[in-house]
């Protein structure tokens, strides 16, 4: 399915589009790839945030972090 959209480019976006076109990408291809790339980046960030949140509520992980903290404390200066 194809959907036609229009939008205004700010200076940074226009510069990025020119760079991509100079690298051999067509205008539509560059925009499509940028959108898909941004979506994937956001999905990865969300997956990492979800994993960190899960680890914050994992009793085994919390116990291991406390154990590592106690171990590392012995190497702090003045201890």
Image (spheres, rainbow, N blue to C red):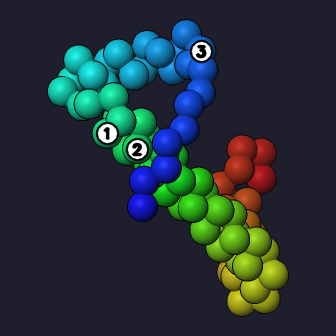
Q: Is residue 32 left or right of residue 26?
A: right
Badge 3 or badge 1: first in the primary sequence: 3
Q: Is residue 48 left or right of residue 38?
A: right
Q: Secondary structure at mark 2?
A: helix
The residue tagged 3 is 10
Q: Secondary structure at mark 3?
A: loop
Front in this rendered view, residue 68 or 34: 34
The residue tagged 1 is 29
Q: Position of residue 79 (x, y in %)?
A: 77, 53
CA distance separating discs 1 and 2: 5 Å
* Residue 60 in the image: above or below residue 28: below
Question: Would residue 62 be seen by someone viewing this image from the given angle?
Answer: no
Label 2 neighbourhood size at 10 Å, few (<14), some (14-19), many (20+)? few
Q: Position of residue 58 (x, y in %)?
A: 75, 85
The residue tagged 2 is 32
Q: Residue at x 24, y 31 (%)?
A: 25
């Amino acid at each position: 399915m194809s959907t036609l959209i229009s939008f205004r480019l700010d200076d940074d976006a226009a510069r990025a589009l020119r760079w991509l076109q100079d690298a051999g990408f067509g205008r539509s291809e560059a925009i499509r790839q940028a959108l898909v790339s941004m979506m994937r980046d956001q999905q990865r960030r969300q997956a990492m945030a979800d994993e960190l949140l899960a680890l914050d509520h994992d009793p085994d992980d919390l116990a291991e972090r406390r154990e590592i903290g106690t171990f590392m404390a012995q190497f702090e200066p003045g201890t």
